[in-house]
Amino acid sequence: MPHIWAAPKSLTIAEQCRDARHVTANRGAGSVTPIEAPSSDMTLPSHTRFVGLAAGKSDRPDLQSARRVVAGSRGVGSKENCEIIYKLADKLGAAVGVSRAAVDAGYCPNEMQVGQTGKIIAPELYLAIGISGAIQHLTGIKDAGTIVAINKDGEAPIFEVADFGPVGDLFKIIPELEAALG
């Protein structure tokens, strides 16, 4: 529950926040008042009607709420080579994400895009496969738990935020990882 210690302020909390930081000390003379969210029930104009919400069918977890995400980029080389990402995601029970570079290259649809112009995610485990780590992409994973990056460029920016980072050919490392997983 957010706390306000000054004149009324507005606060927005992203759904993907990983953890809450609790305030332990009163920071002033003001009082703390919990605020209930207003109801979203509203009367629509007569020329408008609500049809419904629908999501595409998939056996994979939803990208924004997944505990594990395997993501790829242009580093996989082609749309066909993205199969290596899907296969690893299936083995881990993970969602699949991609960088903007993969979307721009036509490898994957934009609804799979992670980053500033895509989805902001906070999985417990994020595997970045062939992702260099542009700042726009890193913005989308800043609240991820453990980040594992696989890239042939040891100087790629993704390694600055990665907890584990094997440097090498993803087409050799991924099969070894899958074999180790069983």
Image (spheres, grey):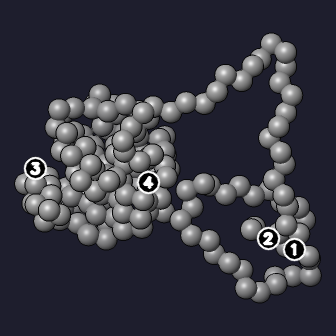
Q: Give the residue displayed 57% in from the left and 61% down from the top.
A: 17
Residue with the mark numbered 3: 171
- Per the image, label 2 sits on a secondary structure element best described as loop
Q: Residue placed at 37% from the left, 31% from the top?
A: 109
Q: Is residue 91 above or below residue 75?
A: below
Do tag 2 and tag 1 residues touch (Cβ < 8 Å)? yes
Outermost residue on the bottom side: it is: 25
Q: Nearer the viewer, mark 4 or mark 1?
A: 4
Q: Residue furthest top?
A: 47
Residue ID for mark 4: 66
Q: Give how far apart the Cα atoms at labels 3 and 1 are.
A: 55 Å
Closer to the N terminus: mark 3 or mark 4?
A: 4
Q: Which residue corresponds to the image point at 91% horizontal and 76% vertical from the top-left?
A: 31
Hey, what amino acid is under mark 3? Phe
User: Which quadrant would the N terminus be assigned to in this image?
Assistant: bottom right
Any mark on residue 54, and which?
none
Q: Is residue 173 visible?
A: no
* Residue highlighted by disc 1: 32
Q: Could you say where residue 5 lies in the image, as x and y percent from the top left? A: 85, 73
Q: Quadrant of residue 66?
A: bottom left
Image height of 133 relative to 103, above or below? below
**Residue at numbered disc 2:** 3
Q: CA distance from mark 2 to mark 1?
A: 6 Å
- Mark 3 or mark 1: which comes first in sequence? 1
